[in-house]
Amino acid sequence: MAQDRAAPVAVETQPAAFSGRTAWGRSIKTPLRSFLQTETGGAAVLLAATLAALVWVNVDAASYDSVWTTTLSIDIGGTGVSLELREWVNSGLMTFFFFVVGLEARRELDLGDLRERRRFALPLLAGVAGMGVAIAIYLAVNAGRPSVHGWGIAMSTDTAFALGLLALVGPRFPDRLRAFMLTVVVVDDILALAVIATVYTKEVTVSALLVAIGLFGVVLLAKRVGIRHGGVYLLLGTAIWVALLESGVEPIVVGLAMGLLAYAYPAARTSLEQASQRFREFREQPTPELARSAGIGLRDAISPNERLQLRYHPWTSYVIVPLFALANAGIAIDGGFLTQGFTSPITLGILFGYVAGKPIGILGGSWLVTRLSGGRLRPPVGWAAVAGGGTIAGIGFTVALLVATLAFTGSQLEEAKLGILSAAAAAALVTWLLFRATALLPKRLKIRALLGTAEPLVDLYVDVDPQRDHVRGPVDAPVTIVEYGDFQCPYCGVAEPAVRELLRDFGDVRYVWRHLPLTDVHPFAQLAAEAAEAAAEQDAFWEMHDLLLAHQDALRPNDLLRDAEALGLDLASFEDALRSHATAAHVADDVDSADLSGVSGTPTFFVNGRRHYGAYDIETLSAAVRAAGARAVLTAT
């Protein structure tokens, strides 16, 4: 039978030979997780840079202004660019920041929740509504005044600061809130750049703008014909940046546009097999040519989007954005300035626009989409979490400062900066209070308020079939864990004790093993998988499964026969099944289902159909099971 409720066989621990090769598995990262962790760390650096700017300008304002107004020129053959140091940071280095924003937006469209395009409507409208209400409040406060043209300051959320502080003040908000907010703030950034490029562009030189558009057309053509050399795109991007600068359009928009062109896709198993083959060739004959070939194979197996994020995201979070804060956040503070600032329509419009407008817009926009769609589109989290996302969106630091420098000068700029900094502090405080209030709710209501009832996207392409799949645990359990594994994979051996402990601790979990033998790196994995299926024909799948993972260094034919004998199987039938590959079709079906689900490595886990990203130690898997169980209960009721 496919179903088997046998308890795990008591086996010895993983051989020491593998121990040094598996430590990384406990801290495995994914693109989204890495993005959020980098933003969290970057927020601390950004906060430090902001405080440093405030201290600097209040200790020695003359030197602060002198440094950032220093002119830096780059001249080649009589033609060049000359800007103040602050402008090089704001218009030059910040282009890389928006390039990373474009990369993450592209990744969400290709691999994230937005790959199902209908789900894009909710964060899109939530982001637009958050911007719209914040801008409306600013316009209402500044109506009839010259300062009304600074409305663009109140529209955009700072990705790094918002997500970083969300992790600090609301650590128990679900991870899906961070992913949802990432989508919302990406919408913010895209629309904000469109406003910067149009509303806050004073004069446009049409000829230079046409050159920039033409060069971007060359970029699209180069991508179309398959040119993959990064230097080509860096050269073209720099040329577009210069052309936009000469045209009068804020050149940082080219960063976002270039980032959106970098597709994201999971590593294909065929690409990984080709990379393995090239590396084996280099191992056998370590020549420079084969080293280059192996390097190309490894690089090409990963999408350009992920490679570029890995390269540039830490630089933007830990260097560029903090440097931007250091150059722009400095304001001289004294009693007279604070009195004037907090009675200024500019300061108050920004403060109330962010602290009140953002949460009202995001929460109201999300509710409106849910209501108009008849509940078909819902936030991926509960309404308390959406409210928390709305309040933390009141941190509008980076783009807000950028727009402020374009809209105002002198005392008005200082008042705008005061409003931006005050809004950031107030938004963090309101989010913390909301989190504390949510924590006081009864447990069931708190779970619903945080997790919601929306059906998550399902990543597992082929559903579990108890008549075919091998199931350990109750058939009707509310939580199902599917593992794609390889009996020769040392990381699967490390994960196995955690899985057994999980099944022991949770009585309402069913566990399914599906085969994914990585034959290009594990020569005995295919035969071991067929051996497990041959044992299954004698109702001993799980017993064989446990033995194979316990003795991963002994998977040759004679070893498999010895295991079958130890389990008391009919050796003649077992050996005949191995020789004839009678069970190979079952293994092949599992491999096909892995390909359809985008699985290319082992172990890969799915929890209630949702792919599990991150470590596979007992703490991480237990947290995933508890969250899935809570959501299953909410869905059932």
Image (spheres, grey):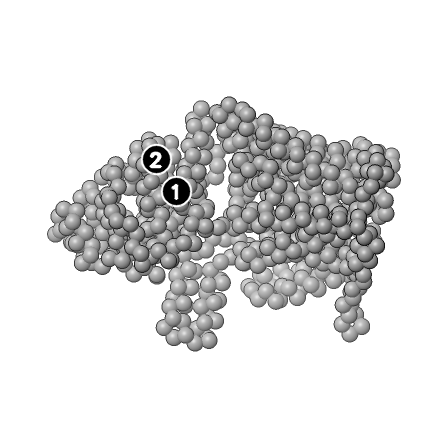
Q: Is residue 330 left or right of residue 529?
A: right
The residue lying furthest to the front in this view is 59
Residue drawn at point x = 75 percent, y = 47 percent = 54
Residue 222 picture quarter: bottom right
Q: Residue at x 28, y 41 (%)?
A: 470
Q: Amino acid at mark 1?
A: Ile
Pointers 2 and 1 in contact (C-beta within 8 Å): yes
Q: In the image, is residue 68 above or below residue 190? A: below
- Under circle 2, the secondary element is helix
Helix or strand or loop: what does disc 1 sit on? Answer: helix
Numbered label tally: 2
Q: Which mark is residue 355?
A: none
Q: Left or right of 375: which side holds 3?
A: left
What residue is shown with label 1?
618
Count residues near mark 1 (Cα–Cα under 10 Å), then give few for <14, some for 14-19, many for 20+.
some
Could you say which is closer to the camera, residue 60 or residue 235? 60
Q: Is residue 108 above or below residue 354?
A: below
Instruction: State which tag comes first along the sequence, 2 or 1.
Output: 2
Residue that mark 2 sits on: 505
> Which residue is depicted at the point 50% across and 29% down?
447
x then y, percent, for residue 260: 61, 53
